Amino acid sequence: MSGATTIYSDGSLTLSGAASTLELGGTFTDEGTFDWQAGGVTLNGASATWNYGSSDFSVGNNTTQSFTLKNGADMSHSGWGQYVFIGHNSGSNGTATVTGWLDLDVRV
């Protein structure tokens, strides 16, 4: 998708199936429910941004997912105290690929 995409507070978007993909080239604002069950999400290009709100961000948490941030794309969150989980639980398969700059508050 290119251009601005918003999931409003009463809306939802579901991505399911290991072969499912969502490529974002514009601004993506998640105010509602992005039900990312499986598959891959790519943010591609300097105009690609995603504010994932005030919740934790998980890739491959109890499922198979991939996340790619490339070519100047940017990801942010609202507030403090969020965590990023990649392949967090037993049997999970999460892959994150970052080309360029990613600024995270990482706790190990």
Image (tube, helix red, strand yellow):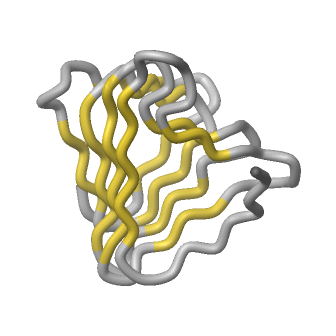
At x 79%, y 53%, the residue is 107
User: Residue 33: x percent and y percent?
Assistant: 54, 26
Whether 4 is drawn above or below 9: the answer is below
At x 29%, y 56%, the residue is 42
Relative to the observer, which residue lies in front, 51 or 81? 81
User: Residue 17: x percent and y percent?
Assistant: 20, 20
Whether 37 is drawn above or below 58: the answer is above
Relative to the observer, which residue lies in front, 18 or 5? 18
Q: Is residue 22 left or right of residue 92?
A: left
Q: Is residue 5 left or right of residue 71?
A: right
At x 69%, y 38%, the residue is 56
The count of marks equals 0
Q: Quadrant of residue 99?
A: bottom left
Which quarter of the image is occupied by the N terminus?
Answer: bottom left
User: Residue 45: x percent and y percent?
Assistant: 30, 78
In the current view of this chain or complex, which residue is farthest to the left? 19
At x 55%, y 73%, the residue is 102
User: Residue 108: x percent and y percent?
Assistant: 75, 51
Q: Quadrant of residue 97?
A: bottom left
Whether 94 is drawn above or below 33: the answer is below
Q: Is residue 25 left or right of residue 74?
A: left
